[in-house]
Image: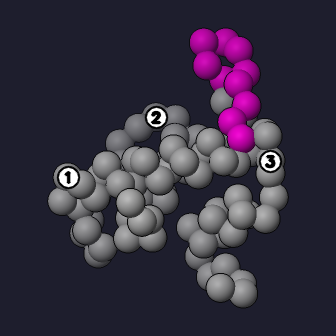
Amino acid sequence: MDRPLTLCELLGKSVESFHNPKMLNWEIEGKWKSFSSEHVYETVRCVALGIHSLGVNKNDKVAPINSAYVRRAVVDKLAEPDNYSR
């Protein structure tokens, strides 16, 4: 893959190429916490595999319901659960 074509590919490529200790910053109980690119990628991977294990497959329709925008970044990656090997 020379050039990422989707946001999901961009996430994977950026984690491979760059270590970012503060990829996402999230306010939790009034304090800001930073999450590294590796942590975000691994969280996305685990959630995607979990959803896939429930029977959600490529082209299935799911609707994320949450109030936190940062959490949406994790859910958006679920669109491609087949990208992860076990």
Please state if 7 lies on the left or on the right of 22 as rendered: left
- Residue 79 visible within the image: no
Q: Residues within 10 Å of mark 2 (few under 14, many from 20)?
A: few
Magenta region includes residue 21: no
Residue at image coords 66%, 48%: 38
Q: How is the image coloured?
A: one colour
Residue 21 image position (x, y, % from top left): 79, 40
Q: In which quarter of the image is residue 56?
A: bottom left
Q: Measure the alpha-carbon separation of dots 2 and 3.
A: 25 Å
Q: Measure the alpha-carbon separation of dots 3 and 1.
A: 31 Å
Residue 78 image position (x, y, % from top left): 41, 59
Q: In which quarter of the image is residue 81?
A: bottom left
Residue at image coords 81%, 58%: 18
Q: Name the residue under label 1.
A: 54
Looking at the image, is mark 3 or mark 1 earlier in the sequence?
Answer: 3
Indicate the amino acid at tag 3: Asn
Indicate the amino acid at tag 2: Ser
Q: Mark 2 points at which residue?
A: 67
Please state if 36 lies on the left or on the right of 86 as rendered: right
Query: Where does the magenta region start and end?
Result: 27-36
Q: Name the residue under label 3.
A: 20
Indicate the amino acid at tag 1: Leu
Q: Is residue 31 above or below residue 45?
A: above
Identify the secondary structure beneath mark 2.
loop
Q: Is residue 82 above or below residue 69?
A: below
